[in-house]
Image (tube, helix red, strand yellow):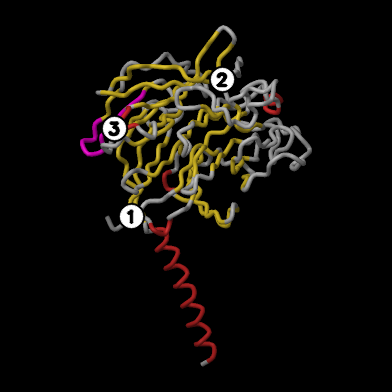
C-alpha cells in the first residue's frame, strides 16, 4: 500500500510539473504578419498603429498591420551599406504627435573613413522633409563594423546614442577624446547639454555620457527611468549593464570574453573604477535589441526585460530585482532564426523582427499574442 501511495505522489508531482510547464509554454502564440523584409534592423510604432521599420540595406518602411500593406518612405539620405553598416535605429521624438520628428542612425563614408551619423526629419505622407544632421561620431575607421547605432530618448527629452568601438580601435574606448566605445548624450536638436559628466574636462568630448564599451546594440529604460545597455562581447562576454553618467564600463581593459583567434584580450575581469555587468553570457548569444514589457496582454510578464539574440536565435526573458538579474528564461526558440529586434507595441503585444541574413527579402515581422485571443 505504501508503494502505491509513493507511486501516486510521484505521478502527481510529475503531472503537475509538466502541466505547469506546458501552461507556461502555451500562454502565447506567434503570428507572422509579414515575410519579405530586406535585413530589417529596428521597429517603432506610429500613433495610428502602423509600424515604422528600418532595413540595414538603406530603406525605411511603413507597415499597416490592418491592411497588410508595406510602403517605402521616400527622401532618405545616402547611406553606406557595407558589412554591419547601413540604416540602423529609428526613434520617434517623444512629442511626435505634434512635431512629426523621427530620428535615425546610419553609417556614412567620408574622406577620413566611415563612421556613424544620426539625423532627424519630419515624417509626413510617407516622405521625409526638413532633414537635419544632429550628430556625426568622431570615430572614423576603415572597417565597416561595430557602429553601435542604438538610440534612446530619456525622460528629459535628451537623446542617447551608442557608438561602437570600430572593431580595430578598441583601445580608444578608454579615452575621452573620441567616440569609439561611447554612449553619447545630446539634446533633441543636436546641441550638447551643459550637465553632461565630462563637460568640465578640457580634453574630453563634451557629449560623452559613458565610456569603455564595445558594440552596444541595446538601449532601453525601465518604468523608473533606469537606463540599461547591452553590448556584444568578442568570443564570449556579451554584457547587460545599468548605465549611469560618467562611468567606465571597462572594455577592453576588463572582459569576460576572449578574442576570436582564442588569444587573451585582457587577463582581468574586474578592475577598480570599472563597472561590472549585471549579467554576462559566455558563450555569446549575440545580443541585438531589448525592451521592457509593461503591457496588459501578458500580466505575468509585467516588468520583465526581453532581450533578442542572433545566435542561436531566441529571446531571453529576464526578471530584474534590486538591480540584479534573478532569473532568465529562453523564449520563442521555435522561431529558429536570427532575431534582430524586439519591441513592446502600443496594444501590448510583442513584435519581433528576424533579419533573414544570407537570403534576400526573407526578414519577418512576428507578433506575440496571448494564446486565447
Residue assigned mark 2: 137
The residue located at (58%, 12%) in the rendering is 113
Quadrant in which the C terminus appears: bottom left
Q: Is residue 353 above or below residue 133?
A: below
Quarter of the image holding residue 243?
A: top right
Residue 325 against residue 229 in the figure, above or below: below
The percent coordinates of residue 348 (x first, y second) are 34, 49
**Residue that numbered label 1 is attached to:** 370
* Image coords of residue 317 (percent x, y): 49, 51
The mark closer to the camera, 2 or 3, is 2
The secondary structure type at the circle numbered 2 is loop
Disc 3 is placed on an element classified as strand
Q: Which residues are magenta?
A: 60-69
Q: Residue at x 59, y 52 (%)?
A: 323
Q: Secondary structure at mark 1?
A: strand
Q: Earlier in the sequence, mark 2 or mark 3?
A: 3
Find the distance from the CA under tag 2 to the CA under tag 3: 30 Å
Count residues near mark 3 (Cα–Cα under 10 Å), then give few for <14, some for 14-19, many for 20+. Answer: many
Position of 315 compared to 126: left or right?
right
Report crowding for label 1: few under 14, some 14 to 19, many 20 or more residues within 10 A (C-alpha): few
- Nearer to us in this view, 347 or 24: 347
Q: State the image quarter where residue 281 is shown.
A: top right
**Prevailing SS of the magenta stretch:** strand
> At 37% across and 42% down in the image, what residue appears?
351
- Tell whether position 24 is magenta: no
* Disc 3 target residue: 63
- The mark found on residue 256 in the picture is none
Could you say which is closer to the camera, residue 14 or residue 119? 119
The single residue placed furthest to the left in the displayed view is 67
| Between marks 2 and 1 in the image, the one whose residue lies nearer the viewer | 2
Amino acid at each position: 500500500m505504501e508503494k502505491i501511495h509513493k507511486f501516486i505522489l510521484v505521478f502527481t508531482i510529475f503531472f503537475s510539473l509538466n502541466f505547469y510547464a506546458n501552461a507556461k509554454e502555451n500562454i502565447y502564440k506567434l503570428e507572422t504578419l509579414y515575410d519579405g523584409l530586406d535585413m530589417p534592423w529596428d521597429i517603432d510604432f506610429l500613433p495610428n498603429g502602423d509600424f515604422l521599420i528600418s532595413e540595414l540595406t538603406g530603406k525605411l518602411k511603413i507597415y499597416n498591420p490592418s491592411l497588410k500593406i508595406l510602403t517605402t518612405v521616400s527622401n532618405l539620405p545616402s547611406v553606406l551599406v557595407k558589412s554591419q553598416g547601413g540604416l540602423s535605429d529609428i526613434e520617434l521624438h517623444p512629442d511626435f504627435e505634434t512635431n512629426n520628428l523621427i530620428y535615425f542612425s546610419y553609417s556614412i563614408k567620408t574622406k577620413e573613413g566611415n563612421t556613424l551619423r544620426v539625423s532627424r526629419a519630419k515624417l509626413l505622407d510617407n516622405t521625409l522633409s526638413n532633414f537635419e544632421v544632429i550628430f556625426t561620431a568622431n570615430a572614423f575607421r576603415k572597417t565597416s563594423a561595430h557602429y553601435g547605432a542604438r538610440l534612446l530618448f530619456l525622460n528629459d527629452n535628451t537623446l542617447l546614442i551608442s557608438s561602437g568601438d570600430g572593431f580595430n580601435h578598441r583601445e580608444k574606448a578608454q579615452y575621452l577624446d573620441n567616440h569609439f566605445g561611447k554612449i553619447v548624450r545630446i539634446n533633441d536638436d543636436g546641441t550638447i547639454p551643459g550637465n553632461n559628466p565630462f563637460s568640465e574636462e578640457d580634453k574630453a568630448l563634451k557629449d560623452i555620457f559613458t565610456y569603455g564599451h564595445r558594440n552596444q546594440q541595446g538601449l532601453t529604460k525601465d518604468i523608473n527611468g533606469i537606463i540599461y545597455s547591452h553590448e556584444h562581447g568578442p568570443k564570449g562576454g556579451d554584457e547587460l549593464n545599468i548605465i549611469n553618467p560618467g562611468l567606465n564600463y571597462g572594455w577592453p581593459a576588463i572582459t569576460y570574453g576572449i578574442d576570436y583567434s582564442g588569444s587573451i584580450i585582457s587577463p582581468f575581469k574586474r578592475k577598480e573604477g570599472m563597472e561590472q555587468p549585471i549579467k554576462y553570457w559566455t558563450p555569446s548569444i549575440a545580443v541585438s535589441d531589448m525592451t521592457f514589457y509593461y503591457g496588459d496582454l501578458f500580466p505575468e510578464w509585467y516588468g520583465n526585460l526581453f532581450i533578442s539574440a542572433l545566435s542561436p536565435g531566441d529571446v531571453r526573458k529576464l526578471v530584474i530585482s534590486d538591480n540584479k538579474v534573478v532569473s532568465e528564461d529562453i523564449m520563442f526558440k521555435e522561431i529558429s532564426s536570427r532575431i534582430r529586434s524586439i519591441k513592446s507595441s502600443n496594444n501590448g503585444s510583442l513584435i519581433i523582427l528576424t533579419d533573414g541574413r544570407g537570403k534576400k527579402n526573407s526578414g519577418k515581422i512576428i507578433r506575440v499574442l496571448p494564446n486565447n485571443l
